[in-house]
Amino acid sequence: MKILLIVFVLILWTETLTYQSPGPGPEYADVVFLVDSSNHLGIKSFPFVKMFINKMISSLPIEDHKYRVGLAQYSDGLHREFQLNTFKSSGPMLNHLKKNVRFLGGSLRIGNALREVHTTYFSNGRDRRQFPPILVVLASAESEDAMEAASKALRSDGVRIISVGMQGTPEETLKAMATGQFHYSLQTVRDLSMFSQNMTQILKDAAQYKEVAAHSHTVGKEALG
């Protein structure tokens, strides 16, 4: 009985460590925004997406040794706006966003976009232990192609995926993409403005995320057995 009690206390202690930050992790990251530009979203809603990107670029410390930001649109295919190493500061990014980013239209093929963004944006980069790669995906509906394999390939390669759904995107679609708990459902595209206020902290949490909870539960169950 005493042994079982000790094991139980150890399990609780292990799980407490799991859900608390073990110490300061990476402060910054390489962040790519992959934004829906399909007919599902619609041209009238697209300005709200651009406003969200504008707010994110303006709020992040973008420098050589801090955040780097890349941007791509998708619908039928991937449309590259700028790479992680294209701009060194926020000013040129905001200028590009204002002058060059235009609505695409077309079908919503998230799987295809994930495969292309994987090879185009995440094939090379900085030290991932210091600057984890993060992909923020905005989606307005269920994907018209399969996306599970592409999502898994990105996560297996160390890319943390934050999925943000708008206009009733199925929860299953968001969960299938996301790393851990980093999936968020917004009622309308207008809600992106309010959501942007939380994104800086979400990016920090994603950068420091470690998948260790499942391991702790396994250890506990083996000990009890």
Image (cartoon, rainbow, N blue to C red):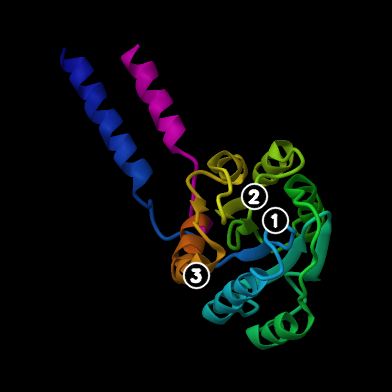
Determine the secondary structure under disc 3: helix
Segment colored magenta: 207-225
Q: Tell me how far mark 2 sits from mark 1, CA to CA.
A: 7 Å
- x%, y% of residue 83? 77, 70
Dot 1, crowdedness within 10 Å: few (<14), some or many (≥20)?
some
Q: Are marks 2 and 1 in contact (CB under 8 Å)?
A: yes
- x%, y% of residue 72? 75, 65
Q: Tell me how far mark 2 sits from mark 3, CA to CA.
A: 20 Å
Determine the secondary structure under disc 2: loop
Mark found first going from the N terminus, 2 or 1: 1
Mark found first going from the N terminus, 2 or 3: 2
Residue drawn 42% across the image and 36% down it? 213
Residue identified by numbered label 1: 40
Frontmost residue, 82 versus 75: 75
Q: Amino acid at mark 2?
A: Ala
- Looking at the rendered structure, which numbered label has been put on residue 105? none
Q: Is residue 169 magenta?
A: no
| Figure check: 116 above or below 91 | above
Residue identified by numbered label 2: 141
- x%, y% of residue 91? 66, 88
Q: Are marks 1 and 3 in contact (CB under 8 Å)?
A: no
Mark found first going from the N terminus, 1 or 3: 1
Q: For residue 49, which quarter of the picture? A: bottom right
Residue drawn 52% across the image and 79% down it? 59
Dot 3, crowdedness within 10 Å: few (<14), some or many (≥20)?
some
Is residue 27 in view? no
Residue identified by numbered label 3: 196
Which quadrant does the N terminus fall into?
top left
